[in-house]
């Protein structure tokens, strides 16, 4: 069996869009930050937050502890702001509309456009915030959500409309001093999603942000902040794609989640940034800090991620389980192929009593790629009767590498930590067995890999499970030759 | 018809079987032979297991079998039951068989397929909800053998090579097995069984018996099988 043609897989989201845009010239200094803040007409406190972060960032060194190898990033060669010329949300340039349409992300509230009278009892299943390079270009069903008191839209708008909420929570989970990439993000973030679910509200639809990088040599630094007030629930999904450029594109996002008493946030990601070509040229460098704080008692944060894209992925969605009885979950499928490198995992920090966490990580690697699971479970001294269950499985093909690096630190005796791990090559025997029943090699690989990921896919919202499955199959297309 | 001509099977360039000339028409054929002589290798090589290199020629209903990929051999009507089928996590028995059928032309609808599948799992006394269980995961040896036969029946292959289908089966299951094989063969199918079990052989209408030996291959009728069962392989091959 030869399994070397995976790289020829077409990345169907690799097109770029011609649109008039406003960009800052490449380069990063204090004036860049003042410029971003001025363009966005931000309040003084936010400019101060950015400047403090920038000062700090200049004193920091890029981390080198991961299993990732990439050429040094020239931060002065990047542009830190690019946005379509028209900033009027009622006048989105047609080509941007078309871009999202082509990506399967509908920005029309279709019924309204078609002149169909809406049945007030029927609630649409998904609301979308679309981010194009540095700005949010459209948010659907905003009015519908406002009826429930839900705030959903771009963080730039929220800074103007709900400054107190943003000021209270921004940087409360990921401080501006946190790490090199988060600190950079704090200094230069341009847009992202803000979401607030009020007390006692169960969000009636899935909230979805779709991030699209389009401009060349532009960093994307989005900032997402989701707050679930007491007794509330929200399911949120993000999707991401980028054109196939020869140069690397830097993406350094921050996502902060906060749940108060009895609240739950279910956060799902389907990450499909451009992975670069078969020789490892181009692709997105994805350095992301995602962290949730279970601030209230009996609250829950669940991360589910399907990672198939990016040349380099550095990402550890984590939970701080501060409230007693709070629950953290991390379900992950990471697929790497060609020359892709992924170093991903989670941290579960148990602070409160009776806190529970579950980690299920599935790594699949093809070609010359490398796929590392890096995890930390910390049970603090007051986290009595806490539990963690971790399961890490890897499946390898060809010359790929898989590495599992779990760290457990336990500071009290009443808690239980369990860990299971498996690593295996996709066996020729299994493929032969499936092929002997009439399935071609590609189909056989798909079935084995899909089966391997099933536990995680089942955690995705229904609409997106199918999409993730599809994406996985496209990713595996031509995996066998 | 399945016809082998000077069929040679090797692993890592070491020949296991050399110059095998055999033909199999509709009916039931038994293959016997001492341990390690290459009976399973014969089956696997015919099915196209990449572990084996082959030489010579194999004609399958007028087609050049050795030129085909494994999945093409299956689609051309060849089936092989495995002694120890591989477990596949996360893939249900029914999802698997449906996918296999869908890969062929003119596959029936899901309702019809599921009804047929459930009918068979009942007939074989497999646990309820067998359709949802994962393929060969946490299944007993006997259950796996039954599952292999169900796949044979669902795919309705023209020619089935059954590699020790009787090992690990209890008396009742053995009875079901003989009935199924006899019934299957009566539809003009070719059934090639690798087995040493008297109870299976005596309950089937056997058309030919082949004894594979180190240096020679003997073909005979069912009496050859009884001779082997009485005297062992020593005086025969």
Image (cartoon, coloured by chain):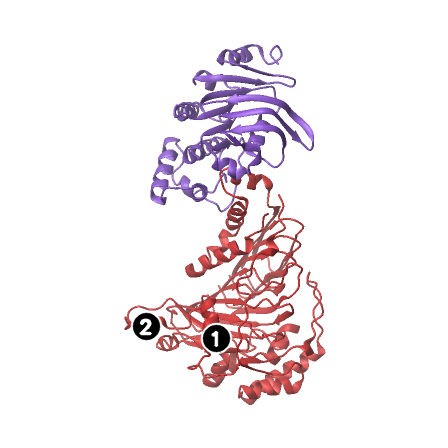
Chain colours: A red, B purple
- Res. B158 mark: none
Which residue is at a point 59% across and 80% down the rendered structure image? A81
Q: Position of residue B154 (x, y in %)?
A: 41, 35
Q: Nearer the viewer, residue B34 or A217?
A: A217
Q: Quadrant of residue A384?
A: bottom right
Give the mark nearer the N terminus: 1 vs 2: 1
Tell which subunit mark 1 falls on: A
Q: Position of residue A95 (x, y in %)?
A: 48, 75
Q: Quadrant of residue A263?
A: bottom left
Against A289, is A453 above or below?
A: above
Q: Nearer the viewer, residue A36 or A475?
A: A475
Tell which subunit mark 2 falls on: A
Tell me whether the residue at label 1 lies in contact with that at label 2, contact meaning CB atoms closer than 8 angstroms.
no
Q: Nearer the viewer, residue A278 or A56?
A: A278
Number of marks in picture: 2
**Discs 1/2, front:** 1
User: In this view of the protein, can residue A414 be seen by the observer?
Assistant: no
In this figure, which residue is indicated by the disc labeled 2? Answer: A114
Neighbour class for label 2 at 10 Å: few (<14), some, many (≥20)? few
Which residue is at a point 48% across and 85% down the rendered structure image? A160
* Tag 1 secondary structure: helix
* Tag 2 secondary structure: loop
Whether marks 1 and 2 lie on the same chain: yes
Q: Is residue A68 left or right of residue A457?
A: right
Q: Quadrant of residue B37?
A: top right
Q: Is residue A83 left or right of residue A75?
A: left
- Res. A95 mark: 1
Distance from the alpha carbon under mark 1 to that under mark 2: 20 Å
Q: If the image is split into quadrants, where does the N terminus of chain A sit?
A: top right
Q: Position of residue B136 (x, y in %)?
A: 50, 38
């Amino acid at each position: 069996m030869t399994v070397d043609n995976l790289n020829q897989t077409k990345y169907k989201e690799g097109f770029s869009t011609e649109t008039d845009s406003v960009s800052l010239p490449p380069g990063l200094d204090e004036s860049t930050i003042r410029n971003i803040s001025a363009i966005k007409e931000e309040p003084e406190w936010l400019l101060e937050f950015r400047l403090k972060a920038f000062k700090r960032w200049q004193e920091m060194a890029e981390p080198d502890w991961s299993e990732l190898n990439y050429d040094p990033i020239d931060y002065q060669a990047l542009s830190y702001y690019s946005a379509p010329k028209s900033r009027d949300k009622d006048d989105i340039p047609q080509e941007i509309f078309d871009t999202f349409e082509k990506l399967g992300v509908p920005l029309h509230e279709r019924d309204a456009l078609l002149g169909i009278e809406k049945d007030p009892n029927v609630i649409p299943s998904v609301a979308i915030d679309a981010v194009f390079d540095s700005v949010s270009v459209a948010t659907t069903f905003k009015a519908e959500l406002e009826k429930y008191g839900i705030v959903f839209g771009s963080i730039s708008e929220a800074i103007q409309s709900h400054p107190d909420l943003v000021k209270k929570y921004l940087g409360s989970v990921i401080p501006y001093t946190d790490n090199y990439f988060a600190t950079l993000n704090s200094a230069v973030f341009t847009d992202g999603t803000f979401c607030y679910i009020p007390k006692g509200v169960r969000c009636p639809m899935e909230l979805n942000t779709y991030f699209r990088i389009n401009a060349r040599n532009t960093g994307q630094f989005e900032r997402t902040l989701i707050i679930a007030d007491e007794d509330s629930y929200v399911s949120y999904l993000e999707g991401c794609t980028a054109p196939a450029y020869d140069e690397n594109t830097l993406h350094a996002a921050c996502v902060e989640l906060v749940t108060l008493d009895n609240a739950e946030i279910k956060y799902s990601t389907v990450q499909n940034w451009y992975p670069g070509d078969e020789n490892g040229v181009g692709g997105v460098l994805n350095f992301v800090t995602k962290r949730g704080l279970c601030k209230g008692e009996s609250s829950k944060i669940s991360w589910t991620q399907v990672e198939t894209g990016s040349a380099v992925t550095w990402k550890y969605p984590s939970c701080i389980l501060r409230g007693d009885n709070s629950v953290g979950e991390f379900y992950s499928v990471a697929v790497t192929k060609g020359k892709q490198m992924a170093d991903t995992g989670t941290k579960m920090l148990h602070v409160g009593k009776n806190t529970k966490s579950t980690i299920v990580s599935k790594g699949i690697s093809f070609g010359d790629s490398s796929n590392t699971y890096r995890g930390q479970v910390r049970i603090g001294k007051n986290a009595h009767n806490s539990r963690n269950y971790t399961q890490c499985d890897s499946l390898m093909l060809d010359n790929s590498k898989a590495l599992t690096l779990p760290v457990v630190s336990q500071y009290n005796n009443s808690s239980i930590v369990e860990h299971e791990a498996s690593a295996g090559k996709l066996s020729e025997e299994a493929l032969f067995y499936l092929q002997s029943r009439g399935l071609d090699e590609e189909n056989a690989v798909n079935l084995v890999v899909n089966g391997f990921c099933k536990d995680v896919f089942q955690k995705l919202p229904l609409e997106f499970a199918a999409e993730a499955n599809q994406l996985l199959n496209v990713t595996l297309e031509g995996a066998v030759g | 018809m399945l016809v082998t001509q000077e069929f040679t099977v090797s692993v890592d360039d070491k020949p296991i079987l050399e110059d095998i000339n055999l033909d199999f028409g509709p009916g039931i054929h038994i293959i016997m032979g001492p341990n390690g002589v290459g009976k399973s290798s014969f089956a696997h090589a015919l099915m196209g297991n990449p572990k084996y290199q082959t030489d010579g020629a194999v004609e399958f209903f007028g087609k050049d079998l050795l030129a085909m990929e494994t999945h093409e051999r299956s689609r051309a009507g060849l089936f092989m039951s495995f002694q120890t089928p591989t477990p596949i996590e996360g893939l249900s028995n029914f999802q698997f068989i449906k996918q296999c059928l869908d890969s062929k032309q003119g596959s029936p609808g899901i309702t019809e397929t599921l009804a047929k599948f459930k009918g068979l799992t009942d007939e074989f006394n497999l646990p309820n909800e067998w359709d949802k269980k994962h393929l060969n995961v946490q299944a007993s040896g006997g259950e796996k053998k039954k599952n292999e036969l169900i796949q044979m029946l669902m795919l309705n292959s023209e020619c089935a090579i059954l590699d020790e289908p009787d090992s690990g089966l209890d008396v009742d299951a053995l009875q079901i097995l003989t009935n199924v094989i006899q019934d299957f063969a009566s539809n003009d199918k070719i059934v090639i069984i690798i087995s040493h079990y008297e109870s299976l052989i005596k309950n089937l209408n056997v058309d030919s018996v082949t004894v594979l030996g180190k240096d020679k291959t003997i073909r005979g009728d069912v009496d050859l099988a009884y001779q082997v069962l009485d005297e062992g392989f020593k005086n025969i091959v």
